[in-house]
Amino acid sequence: MRTMVWLALAALAFGAHASEEDSTPCDNVENDQQNYDCALFSRTTAERELDAAFADLLERIKEQYAGQEAKVSDLSKRLNNAETQWKQLRDADCKVETFDAKPGQAFDTAQNTCLAQRSDDRSEYLQSLGLQ
C-alpha cells in the first residue's frame, strides 16, 4: 500500500505541478509528514482544478447554446446532477480504497491521494467534453 501511495503521489506531483516553477510540498518527499503534506496539497489543487474545469464546461455550454436558454438550463441541470452523483461515487470508491488504512495520518494521506487522483481524472474528462 505504501509503495502505491508513493507512486501515486509522484505521478500527481509531476502531472499536476510539472508546469509550475514554484516550490510545492511535493518537492523532495522523504518522510511521512511530507507525504501527508503533499497528498493534502495534491487534493486541494486537484479539487480547485476540478471546480475550474466544471465552471469552464458550463461557460462553453452557454457559448454553444447562446440564445437557447432552455437548452442551457436543461444541460446545466444534467451536468450538475451528474457532478453530484460522480462526487458520491468518488467518495465511496475512496472509502473502499482506504479501507485497510489505519486511522490517523496514514489514512488521511491515502484518502487525500485517492480524492486527488479521482478529481484529476474527472477534470480531464470534463475538459475533454467536446460539445458541438
Image: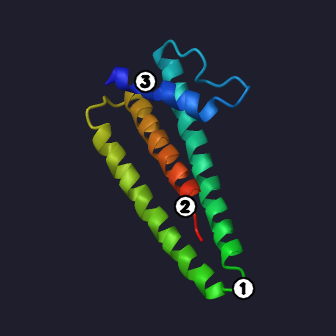
Residue appearing at x 50%, y 24% in the figure = 10
Looking at the picture, does residue 50 appear above or below residue 68?
above
Residue 85 position in % (x across, y down): 41, 63
Where residue 7 sits, quadrant-wise, is: top left
Residue appearing at x 57%, y 51% in the figure = 50
Where residue 100 sits, quadrant-wise, is: top left
Kind of residue sitting beneath label 3: Leu
Residue 53 position in % (x across, y down): 61, 55
Q: Which mark is residue 67?
A: 1
Residue tagged 3: 7
**Mark 1 neighbour density, 10 Å: few (under 14) some (14–19) many (20 or more):** few
Q: CA distance from mark 1 to mark 3?
A: 47 Å
Kind of residue sitting beneath label 2: Leu
Front-most of 47 and 54? 54
Q: Split into 4 quadrants, where in the image is the C terminus? A: bottom right
Kind of residue sitting beneath label 1: Gly
Residue at the left extreme, as displayed = 100
Q: Which mark is residue 100?
A: none
Residue appearing at x 41%, y 37% in the figure = 111
